[in-house]
Image (cartoon, rainbow, N blue to C red):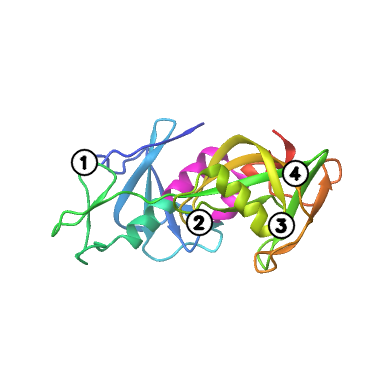
Amino acid sequence: MAFRPGHDPSLRPGPSSRVLAVADSKVAEGVAVGGEPLHVGWIDDAPVFAARPTDGLPEDARGLRAVLAEGPEDFALAAGRAAQLLDWETTHAFCGRCGTASERSSAELTRVCPNCGLVTYPRISPAVIMAVRRGDEVLLARRAGLSLFWSVLAGFVDPGESLEQAVVREVEEEVGLQVDALEYVGSQPWPFPSQLMIGFRARYAGGELRIDETELAEAGWFRLDALPEIPPPYTIANRLILGR
């Protein structure tokens, strides 16, 4: 099966639809939902909708991070898009220009202010994620107070900055190293709440390892045949580390 993102404002949930309830970074199906579900795409030919649960989610609801890491891929992509769009609706419930309650558009995936006419599209925040290589070694780090995994470096793109400039800057800021020979690898939506992770490989070009302790707990070079615990296979971080 495959997930195809899209939005048809005329669609409403039917017998063949899948309605994903999202709350508190968890997702479940088959629970009571409130409001008008938002169409977010299709899994094969079945329309998929996002909604908020009316009475919370069951205890066995899956965490969104676990879903994105473990799959299945079609459900993970649908759940990620559902979470991102619901967060966008919540944070843009009122017009950012005049403060009036905004409304869903009946024509496209936007929110419209009925007072001043401001049109707001879903917000995406680009972030670079990069595997730095030194011969047959890859640079891995653990985030301060966040993760048990060792992973590659990542960071948000600043206004007025290219993706390549962001890679160079983030590596310099987080571990004090210089890189060159950047190569684009791929991208992955990452709905925490609205990132697009844009993956690169880069070559170590100089400098001594010096971590930013506000961002990282530790960092080091690892041979590909002696890796610590890394992010699971479905993530772009795993793909960057293993060269897939």
Residue 44 place in picture, x, y as percent: 44, 31
> Is the C-beta separation of discs 4 and 2 under 8 Å?
no
Name the residue at the left extreme: 115
Q: Nearer the viewer, residue 198 or 188?
A: 198
The residue labelled by disc 1 is 107
The quadrant where residue 202 appears: top right
At which x and y percent is residue 78?
Answer: 46, 43
In primary-sequence order, the first of circles 1 and 4 is 1
Indicate the secondary structure of the residue bearing disc 1.
Answer: loop
Q: Nearer the viewer, mark 3 or mark 2?
A: 3
Distance between the Cα atoms at labels 1 and 2? 27 Å
User: Is residue 109 placed above or below 101 in the rendered structure?
Assistant: above
Q: Disc number at residue 192?
A: 2
Q: Is residue 30 visible?
A: no
Mark 4 belongs to which amino acid? Tyr
Contact? badges 3 and 2 (CB < 8 Å)? no
For marks 1 and 4, give the CA distance.
49 Å
Mark 1 near mark 4, Cβ–Cβ under 8 Å?
no
Label 1 or label 4, whichever lies nearer to me, is 4
Q: Which mark is residue 53?
A: none
